[in-house]
Image (cartoon, grey):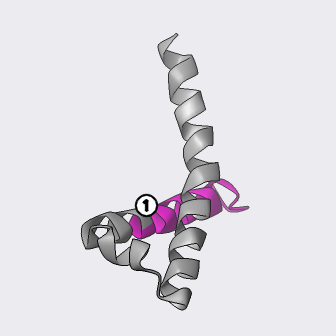
Amino acid sequence: MISTIIIIGYVFAIVVNPLVNIFYLFMLIRKKPLLQRLPKWLVLANFIFLLLQLQYLLFLNDTFHY
């Protein structure tokens, strides 16, 4: 049960985090008030986690991985 929850969270994070960051980008471009109501630390944390996820995925697909 616990391993299933971990796998679901792992896959869910890979799918949802880029979508949330794209949504933030569109709101920033359009200067919608919704983005101004969100805490800045939440937007920054989501972006940092996106960068970490990308780095992790690139590390997994590295051909020189020992």
What amino acid is labelled 1 in the image?
Phe
1 and 56: which one is in front?
1
Q: Residue at x 27, y 67 (%)?
A: 39
Q: Above or below — where is 1 with respect to 62? A: above
Q: Name the residue at 44% across, 69% down.
A: 47
Residue 29 picture location, percent across and down: 54, 89
Q: Nearer the viewer, residue 61 or 50?
A: 50
> Is residue 45 visible from the viewing direction of this image?
yes
Instruction: Using the image as rendered, state which of residue 43 and residue 30 is in the foreground.
Output: 30
Report if residue 9 lies within the magenta region: no
Q: Residue at x 51, y 27 (%)?
A: 6
Q: Main secondary structure of the magenta part?
A: helix
Q: Position of residue 43 (x, y in %)?
A: 37, 69
Highlighted range, magenta: 47-66
| Image x and y of residue 20, in percent | 54, 62
- Residue 36 position, x and y percent, is 33, 78
Q: Identify the residue position indicated by label 1 in the image.
A: 49
- Say whether residue 61 is magenta: yes
Farthest-out residue, top: 1
26 on left or right of 24: right
Count of numbered circles on the image = 1
**From what the image shows, is residue 42 above or below residue 27?**
above
Query: Residue at the spot x=59%, y=30% of the render?
Result: 8
Q: Quadrant of residue 55?
A: bottom right
Query: Which element is circle 1 on?
Result: helix
* Whether residue 66 is visible: no
Horizontally, residue 13 falls left or right of residue 43, namely right
**Which residue is at the far front?**
33
